[in-house]
Amino acid sequence: MSGETQEPKRPLVPSANLDPSDWGEFRALAHQMLDDMIGHIETIREGPVWRAPAAETRQRFARALPHEQRQLGDVLDDVRSHILPYATGNLHPLFMGWVHGAGTPVGMVAEMIAAGLNLNCGGRDHVGIEVEQQIVRWMSEALGYPTGASGLFLTGSSMANFLAVTIAKTEALGQQVRQAGLAQQQQLTAYTSSEAHGCIAQAMQLSGIGSANLRLVAVDASGRMRPEVLSAMIEADRAAGHLPFLVVGTAGTVNTGAIDPLESLAAIAARENLWLHVDGAIGALAVLSCELRGLFAGIERSASVALDFHKWGHVPYDAGFLLVRDSAAHRRTFAQPTAYLQRADRGLAAGETWPCDLGPDLSRGFRALKTWMTIETLGSERIGQAIAETCHVAAYLVERVEHHPRLELKAPVALNIVCFNIRGEDSAFIRTLVLDIQEAGIAAPSWTVINGDLVIRCAIVNHRTTRDDIDAFIGHIDRYLGDKRL
Ligand SMILES: *Cc1c(COP(=O)(O)O)cnc(C)c1O
């Protein structure tokens, strides 16, 4: 035996290592795909806004779990023929439905880098935490928050709003509510406007407080919460023995882009000792525009703000964000001692506060990178200008609607959301019109209900949308109204 080493038997199965066996081939295929994606974005105008996945494509994704490996080149061909043509459509300048960000090429590159590095940003001492903290400080600066505020990335504002409700609840009842739950507690009541996003009611449900304890405050003709109604509701609830704890103001409502009177809400919240949270999913990033910033006065007095970089910030999905003025309050709701997450004063476990102390996510991706690279590359001014420009384009659409014999504006336009109708046509007609336009691939408006009427709703979020696009859109509507052909 001595001196003789026996060759270990090598199994004949492929390596357990999941890296490519031929790095050169992999590199070539990956470079080609990157080129194709850049081309896809560069020529986005040339294709339809949207088309429904072909039957063959739907079938393609109804197959059984593949046991065998396949060549990457073949898989990428599937991506080219079955994925690329059937995207949501939100990159296209005539996508105006809901409120969708349009993405940027730099955001795409950032996603590639983030995936390659595959950081886990739940905690520990690495650069991902530093980059996220940079965004926390930038947003504090932009929104007028004090240094020392805390924040973190989440999937979206739905989650950020949910976290804010939870923090406000813990602050109102004390940290022991985390163990004891809500039983025996005085009834909490929260307030938001009747135009608030549905995720606020859902946050009340998920936090165990119940959406029946969310008061919907009436709005004025511009869709803004009426502060005097808010005050009266708080007073009535106190008289009934309840514990008002939270006001959620909206900076850019989903229906019409209305901005609640944040100064008044801040004054009421201070007087009544309520947590003021601002749902800034749509609007908060408009503070980057010097032209629009003034509309949000008072946001700097809030206790927390939810915002979405993936909407007006055009960071690729998903990139929601929560900013909390009082970092200690933020920690009190989520931090928990566990042996396996113990901190150290050096090494990889260093760092006092980790993102996992600030929300329910433990494993988390590097959303901060695509946000940092987008802001770093474009600069806050240019992003702010792009935001303001969508409002200008929306104002142009308003002009076209108001000068059109058949079209009628249905709601005041605060920012970039335009709701209009066709005179003399009913809801069924509007519905069909919107769906026909979407299916023709020429534009993608959506709809909503304003004062009981179904209306066409155009949210101009896309930095690629121009006045010419609006003219083309109105032209399509004209043709449709003429002979129902698109
Ligand atoms: C989009 C939106 C939300 C939800 O945000 P997500 O990022 O989609 O989770 C909440 N509030 C308002 C006003 C929104 O427009």
Image (cartoon, rainbow, N blue to C red):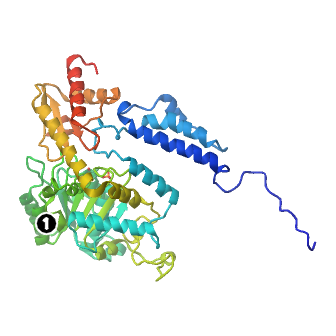
Q: Residue 412 lies in what quarter of the image?
A: top left
436 and 130: which one is in front?
130
The C terminus sits in image quarter: top left
Residue drawn at x 33%, y 75% as measured from the top left: 332
285 and 434: which one is in front?
285
Task: Evaluate whether residue 258 shows in this view.
Answer: yes
On the picture, is 336 further left or further right than 281? right
Q: Report x, y in % for residue 352.
A: 40, 78
Task: Evaluate whether residue 61 shows in this view.
Answer: no
Q: Residues within 10 Å of mark 1 (few under 14, many from 20)?
A: many
Q: Residue 110 lies in what quarter of the image?
A: bottom left
209 and 362: which one is in front?
362
Q: Which amino acid, by three-letter code, is at mark 1?
A: Ala
Secondary structure under the numbered disc 1 in the rendered image: helix
Residue 460 to residue 307: above or below: above
Q: Which residue appears farthest toward the right when viewing the image?
A: 1
Residue drawn at x 41%, y 31% as measured from the top left: 52
298 and 195: which one is in front?
298
Q: Residue 215 lies in what quarter of the image?
A: bottom left
The N terminus sits in image quarter: bottom right
Give the residue at mark 1.
266
Q: Report x, y in % for residue 405.
A: 10, 25
On the picture, is 401 further left or further right than 371? left
Q: How many marks on residues?
A: 1
On the picture, is 64 further left or further right than 481? right
